[in-house]
Image: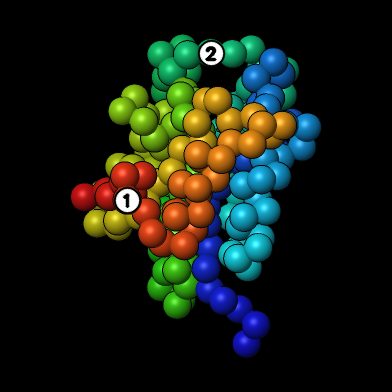
Amino acid sequence: MYRQGKVVFLSHCILNQNSVVKPLARAKGGYNKIIEEIIKRDIGIYQIMCPENKYLGLHRLPKTKQEYDNKDYRKVCKDIACEVVADIEKYTNNSNKVLGIIGISESPTCSYNKNKGILFEEIFYLLKEKCISIPILNVPTDYLEEKQNEKFIDKLIDFLDNKTTDINIEIK
Ligand code: SF4
């Protein structure tokens, strides 16, 4: 009876910057400003597994998409993508609204820019195959927990309140 039935899917490191390649961390713990906006609205959080951490561990060095893009890493990402998309379906089929997915701009794994990261590419293929349309938002490369990040937070609020415009990437 208490459930609002709204869920947002987040790249793992939005909640846990300890999973990021060391010099690239942008917050002490998580992206609190993003998390606060979600919590304020009583939206449930689904934390997607970090594929890079699963594949190479916490002491990995930065790599490009091309360097990651091999058969083994694709398999890691495909397996995670299958779980994520199955869970999106599960929530949706049980009267929940999945508000969308938030990824990380320019990540070789979790970005949803023109040049998609490997995990998000795999998620995209599966959603497309199943004709599921869902908004996707990227945390920009200049997001820093200690900054105001006003522009992005405004976009995030629109995204969470279902008022997305330019950031509403329809998957068809
Ligand atoms: S692979 Fe994704 S979740 Fe993991 S650190 Fe990179 S952007 Fe974050």
**Residue to which mark 2 is pinned:** 63
Q: Where is residue 84 in the image (x, y as percent from the top left)?
A: 48, 51
Q: In this view, does 24 lie to the left or right of 91?
A: right
- Residue type, mark 2 in image: Lys
Relative horizontal placement of residue 30, taking residue 172 as reference (left or right): right
The answer to whether residue 38 shows anywhere in this view is: yes
From the top left corner, tell me how far across and down residue 130 is, in percent.
27, 56
Q: Which of 32 and 149 is in front in this view?
A: 149
For marks 2 and 1, give the CA distance: 32 Å
Determine the residue positioned at 78% across, 32% down. 28
Whether the residue under disc 2 has CB within 8 Å of ligand 1: no
Residue depicted at x 62% and y 55% = 37
Q: In this view, does 145 lie to the left or right of 115?
A: right
* Circle nearer the N terminus (2, 1): 2
Q: What residue type is labelled 1?
A: Thr
Kindly give the residue lying farthest to the bottom in the view shown: 1
Residue 72 placement (x, y as % from top left)? 48, 24
Residue with the mark numbered 1:
165
Say which of 112 and 83 sits in front.
112
Q: In this view, does 126 lie above or below 62?
A: below
Q: Which mark is residue 124?
A: none
Q: Is residue 75 visible?
A: no
Q: Which residue lies furthest to the right in this view?
A: 28
Q: Is residue 28 left or right of residue 119?
A: right
* Outermost residue to the left: 172
